[in-house]
Amino acid sequence: MFAYLLDTNTFGYIANGFSPSARAEYLKLETDGISKICISVITEADIRYELSWGAISARRRAAIENLLLKVDILPWDSEAAAAYGQARAALRKQGLTVEGMDLLIAAHAASTGAILVTRDSIFSSIAELANISSIVDWANDIAAS
């Protein structure tokens, strides 16, 4: 079984249809029988914040809630905490800092051995230090900003 851990932006691209490529990859893997598509509870927290904070249309809210029902939400555990501590220390030794939520998601991918699905280039630059096994970008149809 292959586990794919969606970061917050990728989750949004799929739920809201901003990336037809990411949505197509999700739909293909959702039913292949060998893939597990998941998010970190950290991502869920970020999504719940956005739902509570922003003025979101009923249609968009329904799309987000529907996708939350379909993905596995991984709990934060001691293995994730250990991976976070190791990654943060390794980055600090190199003089690097990473946004807090991003590092928590990276550590969760590392602790579970999941393939991290992201468009964010910071993950590629810290993958080795954070012990992220693999990174893919499903949203390759979105222009670089």
Image (cartoon, rainbow, N blue to C red):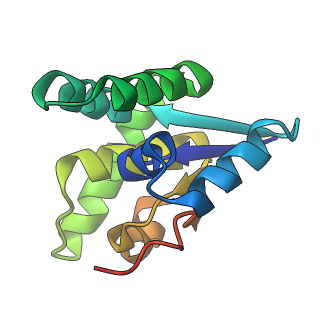
Residue at image coords 19%, 48% = 100
Q: Residue 84, image x and y in percent? A: 33, 45
x, y percent for residue 111: 52, 42
Picture coordinates of residue 48 (x, y %)? 27, 24
Residue 115 in view, yes or no: yes
Residue at coordinates 78% horizontally, 48% vertically from top-left? 28
User: Which is more toward the observer, 3 or 133?
Assistant: 3
- Counting the numbered discs, the total is 0
Q: Is residue 55 above or below residue 27?
A: above
Towards the viewer: 3 or 29 = 29
Q: Is residue 26 left or right of residue 9?
A: right
Please indicate whether residue 123 sits to the left or right of residue 137 in the image. Answer: left
| Residue lying at 27% horizontally and 29% vertically, measured from the top left | 57
Quarter occupied by residue 11: top left
Q: Is residue 136 above or below residue 49?
A: below
Q: Residue furthest bottom?
A: 144
User: Which part of the image, by quadrant, shows the C terminus?
Assistant: bottom left
Query: Toward which corner of the image does residue 55 lie, by quadrant?
Result: top left
In the figure, is residue 17 to the left or right of 55?
right
* Above or below for 53 versus 123: above
Q: Is residue 41 something that shows in the picture? A: no
Q: Residue at x 30, y 52 (%)?
A: 103
- Point out the image quarter for the N terminus: top right
User: Residue 59 placed where, x, y %?
Assistant: 38, 28
